[in-house]
Every structure is written in C-alpha cells, then in structure tokens.
Amino acid sequence: MLDNQNIFEDEDIAEEDVLEEDENDQVFFLYNQLINLDYADIENIQQIEISLYKELNAAPDDNLAILGLMQTQLMLGNRDKAKDFAYSLWDKGEQLDAMEEYIYIKALINLGLWKMASILLKPHFEQLSRDIDKFFKVMIKFSTMIGNLYLLERLLSNPKAPNIDMGCKEIVALYKQKNYDNHLKNIMKIVHEHLGEKLCACEYQITPENLDICLYIPEKDETLTEINSDLQAKFNDYYQKFGISGLDNFSISLYSISQHLKERMY
C-alpha cells in the first residue's frame, strides 16, 4: 500500500472543468474571490476569512468552507492553523466531490503533507485514463514536487492527457538523458526533510530548458537568507557525495509567503 511506502520511490500508483458548482453558492463565490487575491492582500483575505467562518457556523459540514478557511491560513502564513483544518477534514472521513478533492490535494501539497496527498492520489493514478482529465494538473504538481520523472512520464504520455504540456515533455526527456532520475528525487527529499514543516505553498515554473521549484514559507527576508543557506549547504553535501557539481537546467527558489501572487489552478 502506498501509505506504507516511501513516496520518493518509483511506484506504479497506476481547472475549469473541475470547478463545477452552483455559481449562486456563497461559499463558492467566496472561495473564487479568495484565489484571485495576491497573498500580500492581507486585509481582503481576512475579510473573506470572517465571511467563511460565518458560513461554516451556519453549515458545519460544508467541506468547501473548511477548504476555503484552510486556504486563508495558507495565504496568511498561519501554517499550524491550516494543518488543523487539513487534519479535521481528513478525520471526518467523508467522500469529497471531485472539485473539493482537487482543492484539498493541492492544499496538502502546498502544506508539505505529501504523504497524505499521495494516499488520495493513489486511486486516481490507478485509474489514470478515467481521472486524468480532472486531476491532471494536481498530479503534475505532486509528481514534480517529489521529483518523480517516472510519474511525470506516465502522465505526459497518456493519450487522454490535456494538451497543456508547458514544456514538461522536453524537460523530462532532458533529465532522463542526463540520468537525473534518482538525483531529482533525492534533492526533493532533502527539500521535504528540511522545509516540510515550514511550507505554505510550493509551485513550479517550467520551460523546455529549465525547471524552477518555487517554495514559500512564512519567514521574513532575513530568516529566509539563513534557511536558504542551510538548504544550499545540504544540496552541496549531496552533490559532493555523488561527485557532481549540481543539476543543470534546475533551480530552487525560496520566498516569503507574502510574495506569492494570486492562486493558479495548477
């Protein structure tokens, strides 16, 4: 079973179309307002947070309200509160609809709760041809964050994969040519071990020539510099151990969560 395995190992766990909801639903309206805000827009995020709490008090079983509140805490850098919402939704054990599950998995990835995300994604990888149209972007994000070229190749080669490649095929082919399969997984494992308890968001920017992992944590600029230095030192130790100078066509950037622009439905 996936939940007993290392998510960084190869495992054949073989947005608009997801967001199908009543446009008159107030919680859905608030959530869409929220994801169209830059993370530095604290005042408006907090106003939406207040409104979502009112909606949740009126309907305590509203999963989307819980997901919306989890997102407000991520955006505000309140990682512990965001985790509380994540675990409360997990513990409810309720079957989420496709839209809610997509949002939840994406939030788990952003929080560094990659094991939980892998458990939810496992049945979708197992039924890839059935589910790839609805979960493709979040599957790509997960596979990228754990550095798994095998999963990325599976997704990109599926005949039902959406035509939104963004340069993924080229960079995956380049990395395989350079024999980066294990190195990429190991580097992302170091990231998770070093920053997994700090992450509020993780994104990627990809071209046919380069992959840039963008990590967002609550710390201010002066602390960011220290954390980034520690992370780079761990990378250098790894590279020295394997006798390589680094990974070409690859970079990791560290930011304060307030620098994150409005949400993108990866």
Image (cartoon, rainbow, N blue to C red):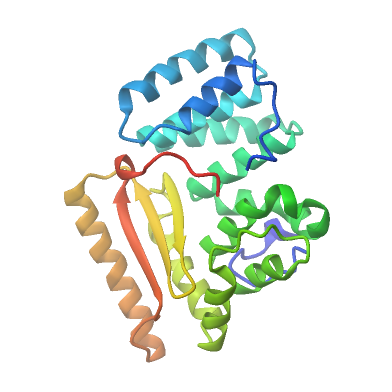
205 horizontally vs 143: left or right: left
Q: Residue furthest bottom?
A: 243
User: Residue 204 in the image: x percent, y percent?
Assistant: 46, 58
Q: Residue furthest left?
A: 222
User: Residue 258 in the image: x percent, y percent?
Assistant: 30, 40
Residue drawn 63% across and 15% down? 60
Question: Quick check: 40 above or below 192?
Answer: above
Residue drawn 57% across and 83% down? 176
Quarter-of-image position of residue 66: top right
**In-front residue for pair 223/158:** 158
Question: Quick check: 89 above or below 111?
Answer: above
Quarter-of-image position of residue 160: bottom right
Question: Quick check: 31 above or below 138?
Answer: above
Quadrant location, the N terminus: bottom right
76 horizontally vs 142: left or right: left
Q: Residue furthest top?
A: 58
User: Residue 168 in the image: x percent, y percent?
Assistant: 56, 68
Quarter-of-image position of residue 107: top right
User: Residue 150 in the image: x percent, y percent?
Assistant: 65, 73
Residue drawn 83% across and 53% down? 130
248 horizontally vs 171: left or right: left
- What is the count of numbered marks? 0
Q: Residue furthest front?
A: 163
Question: Quick check: 223 above or below 79?
Answer: below
